[in-house]
Amino acid sequence: MFQEKNFFVYIMTNKNHTVIYVGFSGQVYERIHQHKKKYSKGFANKYNLNKLVYYEKFESPNEAIKREKQIKKWNREWKINLINDFNPNWDDLSHFLQP
């Protein structure tokens, strides 16, 4: 049986919303879990980025990567506006991305 594959661009932040991280994943459930459990010693762990505040779903990895690169180039204010339009209360949306 063929299972549809989705790719995600997502934005994580910390509890005080002082740092914004833009990421891409083809295994978003696992990736968000890794952020929350601090499995890697990278940027997200260093700044305690454990709150998913934005995501977009794509069928093509190329489209998702292109979008991730686009958002990463934006200034902070544009990223904040994107989050505010999608998730005005900056709630943790990780429960929407359960397998």
Image: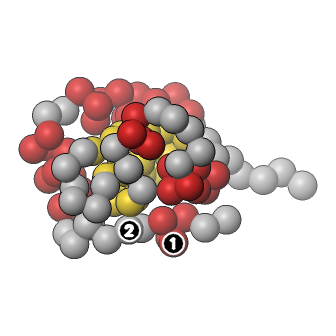
The residue tagged 1 is 95
Tell me the crowding category of disc 2: few under 14, some 14 to 19, or many 20 or more residues within 10 angstroms, Cα based: some
Would residue 18 be found to the left or right of residue 27 on screen? left
Q: Residue at x 13, y 34 (%)?
A: 75
Q: Position of residue 37 (x, y in %)?
A: 56, 55
Would residue 4 be found to the left or right of residue 55 on screen? right
Tell me the crowding category of disc 1: few under 14, some 14 to 19, or many 20 or more residues within 10 angstroms, Cα based: few
Q: Is residue 32 visible?
A: no
Q: Position of residue 99 (x, y in %)?
A: 67, 65
Q: Is 79 above or below relative to 73?
A: below
Q: Picture quarter containing residue 33?
A: bottom right
Q: Picture quarter containing residue 86?
A: bottom left
Secondary element type, mark 2 = loop
The residue tagged 2 is 92
Q: Residue at x 56, y 38 (%)?
A: 40
Q: Which mark is residue 55?
A: none
Q: Position of residue 36 (x, y in %)?
A: 51, 56
- Toward the viewer: 5 or 14? 14
Q: Type of residue at label 2? A: Asp
- Asked if labels 1 and 2 touch by Cβ distance under 8 angstroms, the answer is yes
Q: Residue at x 64, y 52 (%)?
A: 30
Q: Type of residue at label 1? A: His
Q: Position of residue 60 (x, y in %)?
A: 56, 37
